[in-house]
Image (tube, helix red, strand yellow):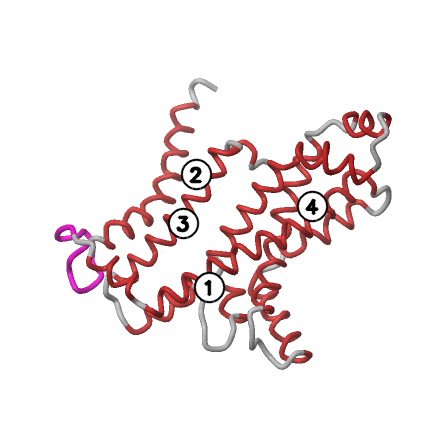
Amino acid sequence: MRRSSPVLLVAVGAVYIFLLVPTVIVLLSSINPAAYLSFPPHGISLRWYQAFFVSTTFMDALLLSLAVGALTAVVAAAIATPAALFYVRHLNFAREQFRLAMLAPMLLPEVLTAIALLLFFNHYFGGTRDLLPLLIGHVVVTLPMVFLSVTSALYNMPPAVEEAARTLGANPFRTFILVTLPLIKSGIVTGAMLAFILSFDNVNISLLLKPVGSSTLPIQLYDYLRYDLNPTAAAASAVSIAITFAVVFLIDRLYGLRAVRF
């Protein structure tokens, strides 16, 4: 093991470089004063961040992404928490089938899920004219992550504490509110934050289910790059990266990244 450790360190370092170099390039390109996307930058300027924040189109897309991400986190947590409780504490048969059904959106390609939802809404509801189809699509693809997070928290909580509360006279609802919920709160909050990240950065679902006449930030960025290659796109990407890293940092500060284990 000691002989292989340098090789392992080199391999891990190569993976980190592969993952982080594109982010570094985007961040450096966003402060490039040149009028077109280029790397390395020829100086330092924040003009493209100013262009991003004064752009009504980008601001509307950013606000829509934040709103959809927040709603997705809340709805996914509200659905996944009782599902995880039922699976861990009460389900005695067809457990693997239930778990597979909850994780199915994670196993299927997102584009197939998006196409299926698009056909469903077009056939029964006349298309994607409002925010509901987009929200449902994001909840569907983020639900497995919250389910796994809450399930992990429940498995790490000894059932004896719930039994002790029941023997002291607490009914099931009171036991859940006063005992179970505080002990699994880390799993719920962590799963909800991960759902927000996945929703905020989603492309496939958003591309097909977005409301008519509006776009989320990733889709607006994609449309922008089709016609213009100035560093405003890099500034928009940098803002998206900053929001994602802020949520990850918040998870780490609240519960530690070890909480994100399934």
Q: Determine whether 122 is above or below 163 in the image.
A: below
Tell me, yes or no, whether the highlighted magenta stretch contains residue 106: no
Q: Residues within 10 Å of mark 4 (few under 14, many from 20)?
A: many
Find the magenta span and give its range.
32-44
Q: Is residue 36 left or right of residue 24?
A: left
Q: Determine whether 74 is above or below 131 in the image.
A: above
Amino acid type of disc 3? Ile
Q: Is residue 27 left or right of residue 64?
A: left
Mark 3: which secondary structure?
helix
Residue appearing at x 57%, y 75% in the figure: 128
- Residues at circles 1 and 4 in contact by the CB criterion of under 8 Å: no
Q: CA distance from mark 1 to mark 2?
A: 22 Å
Label number found at residue 64 = 1
The earlier-in-sequence mark between 1 and 2 is 1
The earlier-in-sequence mark between 3 and 4 is 4
The earlier-in-sequence mark between 2 and 4 is 4
The image quadrant that residue 21 belongs to is top left
Q: Which residue has dot 3 on it?
A: 243
Q: For this rendering, which residue is in front, 24 or 47?
A: 47
The earlier-in-sequence mark between 3 and 2 is 3
Q: Residues within 10 Å of mark 2 (few under 14, many from 20)?
A: few
Residue appearing at x 37%, y 71% in the figure: 223
Q: Pick the quarter of the image with the C terminus.
A: top right
The earlier-in-sequence mark between 3 and 1 is 1
Q: CA distance from mark 1 to mark 4?
A: 25 Å
Label number found at residue 249 = 2
Where residue 215 sits: x, y (%)? 44, 69
Q: Which residue has dot 4 on it?
A: 81
Mark 4: which secondary structure?
helix
